[in-house]
Image (cartoon, grey):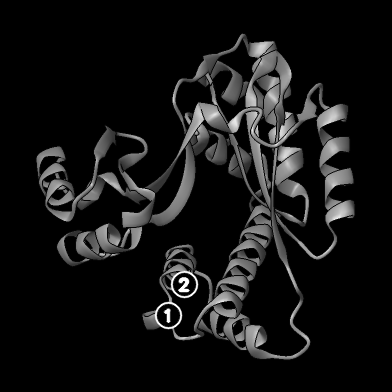
Amino acid sequence: MAGHSKWANIQHRKGRQDAARSKLFSRLAKEITVAAKMGDPDPDKNPRLRLAVKEAKANSVPKDVIDRAIRKSQGGDAENYEEVRYEGYGPGGVAVIVEAMTDNRNRTASNVRSIFSKHGGNLAETGAVSFMFDRKGQIVYPAAVGSEEAVMEAAIEAGAEDVEHSGEEGHVIWCAMEDLNDVSTALEAALGEAESTRLVWRPQTTAELDDETAAKLIRLLEALEDDDDVQNVTANAEFSDTVLESMAG
């Protein structure tokens, strides 16, 4: 989402990094287990698992954690996770998409509904806001990987649709959802390993909020991300430097 990288940096300055890192490892391991259970446990034969492992490695998840998650998928006692998407509205009417993996749909729905309610939002029906987003492949490289021209040329050659350049956030490369594996593989050959390779909900337009409303929205998004069943949270909002700095206090 727009402003998400800056928001992540604020979380680190707030001292959330240890909890966030633990949650990130858990989220990535769960995705690996589910991907391996749904398909082949060999990443070379399972595109979804290959992307999950690539994302885990980019986030410094230890090899033994990755291997254990794959082995877990093949055991008879592996949890039966169900993928669930929730949609709702946050403060200021901002559209929010919550993706979860759960072994208890009732528990997760109750928790997500409660978090929305406590933070000035409300849960809506599936499909209520997702039409405001496009499902896209997103590949992120640091600014130091190369010039805008070099990255653009590599992205075009790899079959990407769009490239965004930012001094702070580096190069964000977008592609069709179904092309993510092929595009990321081609880019890796040209530019090296990416910082992040994943499917995301890309907002078609973003809402600008006043600082008070933006701060309330950030608290909602953080609370959702802290839930054990939640994998990803996306909102179509912009955050100003002012409100992000104030949240760091």
Q: Residues within 10 Å of mark 2 (few under 14, many from 20)?
A: many
Residue at the top extreme, as displayed: 210
Image quadrant where residue 228 sits: bottom right
The residue located at (77%, 39%) in the rendering is 223
Residue at disc 2, secondary structure: helix
Image quadrant where residue 74 sits: bottom right
The residue located at (62%, 8%) in the rendering is 210
Q: Which residue is mark 2?
A: 53
The residue located at (53%, 40%) in the rendering is 9
> The residue under label 1 is which amino acid type?
Pro
Closer to us: 68 or 99: 99
Closer to us: 111 or 19: 111
Where is residue 5 drawn, in percent x and y?
48, 38
The reply to whether callout 1 and callout 2 are in contact (CB within 8 Å) is yes
Left or right of 144? Residue 118 is right
Mark 1 and mark 2: Cα distance apart in space: 8 Å
Left or right of 16? Residue 182 is left
The relative height of residue 28 versus residue 245 in the rendered view (above or below) is below
Q: Which residue is mark 1?
A: 43
The relative height of residue 249 versus residue 65 in the rendered view (above or below) is above
The residue located at (26%, 44%) in the rendering is 143
Q: Residues within 10 Å of mark 1 (few under 14, many from 20)?
A: some
The relative height of residue 36 versus residue 5 in the rendered view (above or below) is below
> The residue under label 2 is which amino acid type?
Val
Residue at disc 1, secondary structure: helix
Where is residue 172 drawn, in percent x and y?
32, 42
Which quarter of the rendered picture does the C terminus lie within? top right
Camera-nearest label, 1 or 2: 1
- All told, the count of numbered labels is 2
